[in-house]
Image: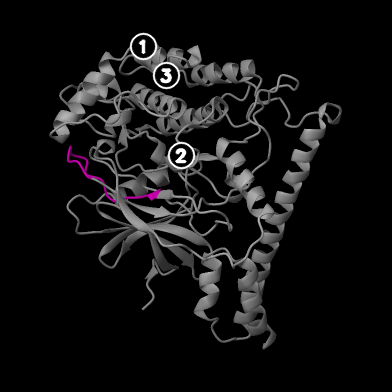
Amino acid sequence: MERIIGGKYKLGRKIGSGSFGEIYLATHIDTFEIVAIKIENSKTKHPQLLYEAKLYNILQGGSGIPSIKWAGVDGEDNALVLDLLGPSLEDLFVYCGRKFSLKTVIMLADQMITRIEYVHSKGFLHRDIKPDNFLMGLGRKANQVYIIDFGLAKRYRDATTNRHIPYRENKNLTGTARYASCNTHLGIEQSRRDDLESLGYVLLYFLRGSLPWQGLKAATKKQKYDKICEKKLSTPIEVLCKSHPVEFASYMHYCHSLTFDQRPDYGFLRRLFRDLFSHEGYEFDYVFDWTIIKYQQAQKNRSQPRSSPIPGASGSRVVQTDMENHQGSHNACYSSEIMRPPGPGMRMQSKSGMGKNLSSDIHADKNIVSEHIPSTLFQLGGTSKRHASKPVLPTESVNPAHGNNNKIGPSSSWISSLQRIHYAKCNTIHYVLAMDLVKRILVIYLLEAAKSFDVIKLPERFEVLMERNEISGALALAVPFCNTS
């Protein structure tokens, strides 16, 4: 029997699981909008979902914050309905061979600093900054970074008095050990500086490919966390940032210089990386490393003759995460597996989880592995330095005065033959995506027309095709039913 959540959302297949619950695809019964639903049993020892829903409500309206569609109790479960998003930065990091280019890291850093600043502006600390908790959007939002998973978030200002929380020690480690700040390891109450320090470790993880305290062996979890702490505290910033631009060391030194209740200068940190971006001669064209790889794979597929039909949705298996990555937390991912185009198989982690224990208990997640990366709408371009054209900075910023007056796109007199070919390919991609959108709209229109004539229910095959993103097949299946009306 089909389950309807909140009277509006028909539950689909499970796309993720965690220590305390599952994440499902779901479809709005009237609009056919596809969403993600987090579900946890309301009788669990430490229910977190409704607390997280309250935080999402407070944060609504900010760029890169998933829209909350519905939250509440459904039967014996707590449920949270959110936007369906794309892959996490950890997923994409693995997809790109466990290393990002400097250009990609700086473009991500700009948005990630802004996301953290927004959360702080609402009076909250995230307390679990890591690659798994930043997701890319889908469609027109494919280049936007989203911040998720607020189960460990905490107010750092009193809601009534607006006073900063007091300095305290002997606190349990909350968050993910790999990216935790030095002060968090030392048991000091977290504040805004700690979220930013964790982000610094994330950026260096992307640049380096790994961090020095990964892969440490120990008999117990506590001993392992102690080893991570010891290695982290004994590694000088200059050693950590060796062979990378000095701006990353400057970022880390700045985070370490902040006092407990000091407001960070987020604009300064953005400018630090934007100046580096300009110095390198990059163009802020939102062409990330995965954009190039995905395009190259698409080109390769087009050049290879097909001898058999493209298979449908592939199977998935459950794998265990590194225990190092979880201390009183889990991953959450509202990642799309239905927006993928035909292409070569890729192992994609769809990390997910439900409620969080706010104590120091350690929980391991299970992850669903999909074999394709979700499709994204992107512009084609190079990631190399472009000293011949003026660097373009993003328009999204809390301080729009810095670098937002530039316009994207070089003058035609500067476009080389190679660039012209790139733009032509880009237009082809946009045409294909536009046609896909037209087909989607037509399917919805036909279904609405069918409803008005009380046409019999479409076969299950239709929903399967829609879930697999096989729009042409779904359209072909829908037309005969509508013709009968």
Tell me how far mark 2 sits from mark 3, CA to CA.
24 Å
Q: Which residue is painted at 73% across and 21% down in the image?
A: 390
Residue type at the position of mark 2: Leu
- Report if residue 436 is visible in the image: yes
**Which mark is in front, 2 or 3?**
2
Disc 1 target residue? 257
> Which residue type does callout 1 highlight?
Ser
Callout 3 crowding tier (Cα within 10 Å): few <14, some 14–19, many ≥20: some
Give the spatial CA distance, label 3 vs label 1: 10 Å
The tag earlier along the polypeptide, 1 or 2, is: 2
Residue 270 is situated, as x and y percent measured from the top left of the image, at 53, 21
Residue 357 is one of the magenta-drawn residues: yes
Could you tell whether 88 is left or right of 422 in the image? left
| Spot occupied by residue 204 in the image (x, y as percentages of width and height) | 42, 24
In this figure, which residue is indicated by the disc labeled 3? 264
Q: Residue furthest left?
A: 219
452, 143: nearer the viewer:
143
Residue 16, can we see it? no
Q: In the rendered image, which quarter is residue 176 located in?
A: top left
Where are the magenta residues, as a range? 350-363
Whole-percent x and y of residue 218?
Answer: 16, 31
Amino acid on which the number 3 mark rests in the picture:
Pro
Contact between labelled residues 3 and 2, with CB atoms less than 8 Å apart: no
Label ID, residue 89: 2
